[in-house]
Image (spheres, grey):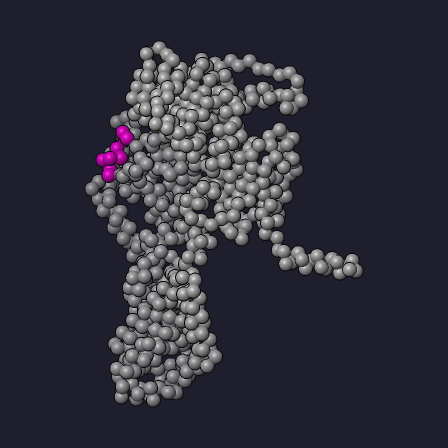
Amino acid sequence: MRGGKAALVVALAALVFAFFFFDLGSYLNLSYLKAQQSHIQAYAAAHPVQSAAIFFAGYVTITALSLPAAAVLTLLGGAIFGFALGTVLCSFAATAGATIAFLVARFLLRDMVLARFGDSLGPLNRGIEKDGAFYLFALRLVPIFPFFIVNLAMALTPIRAFTFAWVSQVGMLAGTAVFVNAGTQLARIESLDGILSPALIGSFVLLGVFPWVARRGLEVIRERRALGKWPRPRRFDWDLVVVGAGSAGLVSSLIGTTLRARVALVERDRMGGDCLNTGCVPSKALIRTTRLLSRIRNARAYGIREASAEVDFAEVMDRVQRVVKTIEPHDSRERYASLGVECIEGEATLTSPYTVEVGGRTLRTRSIVVATGAAPLVPPIPGLERVAYRTSETIWDLRTLPRTLLVLGGGAIGCELAQCFARLGSRVTQVEMLPRLLPREDEEVSELIARRFGEEGIDVRAGHVARRVETDGEGPHRLICEHEGREIALPFDEILVALGRRPRVEGFGLEALGIGIAADRAIEVNEYLQTACPNVFACGDVAGPFQFTHVASHQAWYATVNALFRSVWRFPVDYSAIPWATFTDPEVARVGINALEARERGIDFETTRYPLSELDRAIADEAPEGWVEVLTAPGKDRVLGATVVGESAAEVITEFVSAMRHRRGLNKILGTIHIYPTLSEANRFAAGAWRRAHAPERLLRFAERYHAWRRGR
């Protein structure tokens, strides 16, 4: 393959060199052709087939090599062969040459470009796969875009060669015909400027706008067809109705009313959704308490000889609820009503894309945003229904500390709560079906967390598949697992099912509207968060692909703006730099890809790691465990992903999120002043480690000789 590419490059370079070395361009300028017009026409009249073949082959060659003579050749085609035959010859020759140039560029450059910029080109490639013909057609119609650049750019995308050829043929036909027609009057043309007049350029631009207008027209037709079976109200009471008042729904309604839309927010239960009431807020309040316990128990490491703490579990859980109650007013109906949102309590049912029924009341709305969140996933394990199992929603009802707690699941929720209850005094067993905890993270991260859990007394059972629950009605109960072909009984007083969350898609009318549900049980949405009903959008956990509060808020902006302004402009949701964290101790935070994902996807990368054991602040805080690891493109400082393991990792990762979002490389982080001593300095030191590994050795050797010369040696 490499030899073939090298030979092709040499051949192309030789042809281009010959063109300029022998000054062949002098035979393809307007003055020369006008002077030789009579001789050329006489030869063509005497040898019509031969002259047409020579002209076609020459045109294909010039176009394939991207040489600056296609416009003059098109004029010549009109002058020699007339409008009809000249248009046929020139248009097909132009398409053939462009396709050859396209294929050559794809063969030589595409693999290299995808290897270096594959992630960045992802959104563009997805757009080309969907609407590439429209984009290419528009570019072909407007002559201000050099055709050879279009050939090269399209070769780097996934557009099929056949599609490229026929769209180019159709798209270039109008412009080719204009030039051929002008060529029939070649004797009167003094320069190419006479052809490309402002009026003609304006006409081409209008032609270029046509595919975009046509695309919008097709979207309008599709939208009317999709909505045609439901009667459209003559007037609307609302611009936007939001179903669900969790993180996504609250942000969506707030953005809507900020944009001066009339917004209704429907919630059947508590405002704030899972995040406030049973998720992020209570779990982080509990984590704070248990981390304090851990510090007290390890007081000797800080020079404190005696320190102890007595845990009152009921008071700990009451504190958790006190934190929730303190934050609750931020998400209350009263606050949102004061901001201009009408908050409606009740069960919402979508009866059409324009109407939402709530307690016998019909809300007529131009657009709907579904933000119903997700619920804990409870698997059909035989016998589980016979015990009072807990989930991330019901664990907060406990007021008596379980003597033995079995945590089913090794993801973020399971790991966080397993560590919390172990520190509070429960004997915790954690069961994970896969070979390790936190399977989305690199293996070394999983090993560190499992090792810490073992040190804290958690019995981690990875590679154990839950088969059934056995109980005599009182306890302790037993979870029967299969491990390496044999059954193992694990006793427990309480069991926490933490196997992820399932989007809430049932019970509010999606089926009747024909809105699809994806394989992961999330609502099917496009890149604009639009469902099969064009005026119904979804965001947050119910839409996927990430179930994080911050992603729900991020999606809410796109869903709301697209819902309100889709007839004018739409914005595809941006997932280019999504961070997340697992709030174990030590914390694990990540953005972008890690080494595991990079290998699975075949992405070339370099790894730079800085251990926290070398960071002054981590040493001072007795928190040296962990590291900052950055993945970069080979030879470049562009960040592909970062993982931070250690104290306050969720805070430290933010600098890498910003770097990825705003395309700032490690050199920019290295050049940013960080306060000393802080944990965030680890980011700068990681950037410095990358810089040292990519030091300009030749320049440094020159500097070394320069300094020696200055010293007189």
Closest to the observer, 599 or 230: 599
Magenta residue span:
506-514
Quadrant (top left/top right/bottom left/bottom right) for the N terminus: bottom left
- Residue positioned most to the left: 229
- For residue 390, above or below residue 503: above
Image coordinates for residue 242, horizontal then vertical, percent: 35, 34
Which residue is painted at 47% across and 36% down in the image?
443
- Residue positioned most to the right: 712
Closest to the observer, 356 or 684: 684
Could you say which quadrant of the image residue 475 lies in?
A: top left
Could you say which quadrant of the image residue 18 lies in?
A: bottom left
Which residue is painted at 29% across and 62% down in the image?
162
Q: Is residue 619 magenta?
A: no
Which residue is painted at 26% across and 35% down in the image?
510
Q: How many marks?
A: 0
Closest to the observer, 370 or 470: 470
Closest to the observer, 627 or 352: 627
Which residue is painted at 35% across and 34% down in the image?
542
Image coordinates for residue 665, horizontal then vertical, percent: 54, 49
Image coordinates for residue 657, horizontal then vertical, percent: 51, 42
Is there any visible trace of residue 153 in the rendered image?
no
Is there any visible trace of residue 469 in the rendered image?
yes
Quadrant (top left/top right/bottom left/bottom right) for the C terminus: bottom right
Q: Is residue 508 magenta?
A: yes
